[in-house]
Each structure stands twice: as structure tokens, then as C-alpha cells.
Image: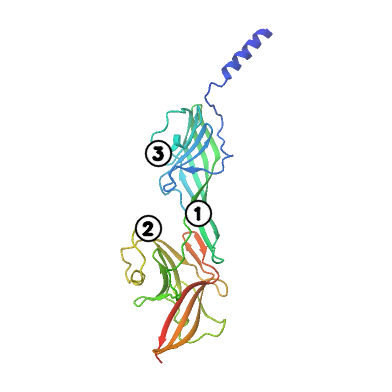
Amino acid sequence: MKKYAALVLFALFLNGCDDGNLTVDIIDFADIAEGQACDITTNTLLYKLKPQEALLLQMPEGSIINDPGTYTYPIDSNTHRVVYRAYDGAVSKDNICGTIPPSTPKVTEEWLGTDGTIEIATTQNEEPNKTDDGTRITGYTHSIIFKNITWSKPAGIQVQPEFEFGLYKTIVTPANLTFKINPNGSAYECDEVNRVYNYNNSFYLSIDDIDPALLVNQVTPGNQPRTSLITATQNKVFYRTAKAETGSITPAYVCAKVQPASPIIEETWTGQPGKENESGIIAVTTTVSTIAAGQVYTHTIVLKNVTLQKGNSTFKLGSNFVLGKIDRIDPN
């Protein structure tokens, strides 16, 4: 009897030997913190790879949103696909992203997500600005979890209340706020619209409907600038960027009553309302000099602790961000 038992155990052992194919009971990619994308421009196919395994998330372009918040999408077999694959050999990016995938390794097992929810919690990544105590956004971190995912696999249906895909990070170009080279440090005024601004070819920073009490031709005492707060109707601050290859920002563009067709504005960031003695403050210091035509009053405009916002994303200009100088001549 003992001999028969031994033979049965030996037979089971032989049947359980690895024939070169990877067999799995659970999916575990926890040791790989970050996913990758086949195309970082569209972010339509994200993946994680282990030596003989791949976890894939395919979504339409625009599903990865560079703005803090939580975004959810239904898992299906068409537009929002979750796929797990096991292979009979080493798998690489080319097996996932190649136009013509290599013939080896071969897929030995595949699980398809057929139901559930994709939940993406997005936060912004920022760093201190190099020239002042402001901040600049450098990218976003997207934490991806599958909620109540139903797997269709060779052995049948399996439901998991929560499965973490992990993190995916996107990179953005930090805001450029270097104005056009101007040895005098001048800012500019529009004639037809109430706007003071400074600019470069790719952006402009403006104050619309500036408080007229800020720009009076009267010298300010030392260290006592005139101040006024950003509000919904006065001292409205905007940072606007031009879409690449659609044209350059010019004074004529900034001061037009009706926005021209070119360049196309890609992003608009809005200065947040001010708080007395704290943030969102427009400060103006005025000095005077004399020329043949009269007296020149120079108004230096500084944005103090101004935060710019687009959607849920924010960054700080700096404690004392200089917009520039406005000269006004008083012939008297």
C-alpha cells in the first residue's frame, strides 16, 4: 500500500512540474511603484512589467488629467480596458508598445477586466522657483486603483474589491515668467483697454481694471507703497500662454479689444482674490524725475504673494514679483 501511495505522489509531482509556462493564482505588482506609458503625449496605454508578466491599462486620450482631483471611469472591454497577461518568457516594452509585437514570448494566460471602476486620484508636483520664494508646477502624480474589478480569466470569474495599479507620473513645463529683455524694466499700458502688463513671445502677465488710485502722480513715502487687493472686479491678474506654433504675443495682441485669432491662448491662470496684509496685493511705489517735457512719474508695480490658479492647480508668483515700471509724464 505504501508503494502505491508513493507512486501517486510521484505522479502528482510530475504533473505539477513547470513546463516553461508561468501559471498564476493572484496578480501582484506591488513591488513596482510606478507605471509607464507607451506614449507620454497621449497616455493612452499604461503598463507595468515583471519578468514574465504584464499589467495593462488602456484608456482614451484625455483620461489622464493634469489637474488635482479624483477621476473615475467604468471598466469595460472596449474603451477602458484592464488586462493582465502571463508569458512563457521574458517580456519587454516592445511586447506591449510595438507596432508589430515580437513573436516571442507567447501569452500563456490572460485576465480581462470586465466590470468595476478605475479611480485616479491626482495631485500636483511643485518645486521652489529658482529666482524667488515662489513655486512652479513640474508635473502631476496619478494614483490609480481599480474598485470592485471583475476579472474574466481561464479558471472563471474573480471579483476583487480593490486592486492598486499604482502610480503614474506626468511631467509639465514649469510656468515661464521671464519677460522680454528690457534694460529699463518697463511694463506697458494699453490705450483702448484698462490693462497694464508685461510679456514675452510666449506669454503675458496682466492686471486688468487696475485701481486708479494706485497710479496717481504723487511720490510715495519711503517703504510705504500704495496698495490694493485683487478682487473680482478690480486688479484682476491673468497669466496667459500662447499655444506653440500659433504665433507670438505682441503689444497689439494684448491690447486688442477683441482677441485676435493668432496666437491661440493655450492656458489662462487667474490671480486669486487678495486678503488684507496677507496675499493677492498690488503694490505701487512712485518716484519722480524731471525732463524738458515736464516731470516723469515712475510707478513700479509689484505683485505681492499672488497665487495663480487654473482649475484646481495653483502656484505662487513670489512674495514680491515685479511686473515692471510705468512712466507717466506730467507737463506741469
Disc nearest the viewer among 1 and 2: 2
Residue 31 located left or right of residue 45: right
Q: Total label count?
A: 3
Mark 1 or mark 3, earlier in chain = 3
- Residue type at numbered disc 3: Asn
- Front residue of this view, candidates 37 and 119: 37
- Residue type at numbered disc 2: Ala
x%, y% of residue 41?
A: 42, 48
Q: Which mark is residue 189?
A: none
Mark 2 or mark 3, earlier in chain = 3
In the rendered image of this protein, does residue 322 appear above or below residue 9?
below
In the rendered image of this protein, does residue 303 appear above or below residue 39?
below
Residue pointed to by mark 2: 244
- Residue type at numbered disc 1: Gly
Residue pointed to by mark 3: 78
- Mark 1–mark 3 Cα distance, whole angstroms, equals 29 Å
Determine whether the residue tagged by mark 3 lies in a helix, strand or loop: loop
The quadrant of the picture occupied by the N terminus is: top right
Label 2 with label 3: CB-CB less than 8 Å: no
Determine whether the residue tagged by mark 2 lies in a helix, strand or loop: loop
Determine whether the residue tagged by mark 1 lies in a helix, strand or loop: strand
In the rendered image of this protein, does residue 218 appear above or below residue 263?
below
Residue 291 located left or right of residue 4: left
Disc nearest the viewer among 1 and 3: 1
Q: Residues within 10 Å of mark 1 (few under 14, many from 20)?
A: some
Residue pointed to by mark 1: 139
x%, y% of residue 65?
A: 46, 51
- Mark 1–mark 2 Cα distance, whole angstroms, equals 19 Å
Disc nearest the viewer among 2 and 3: 2
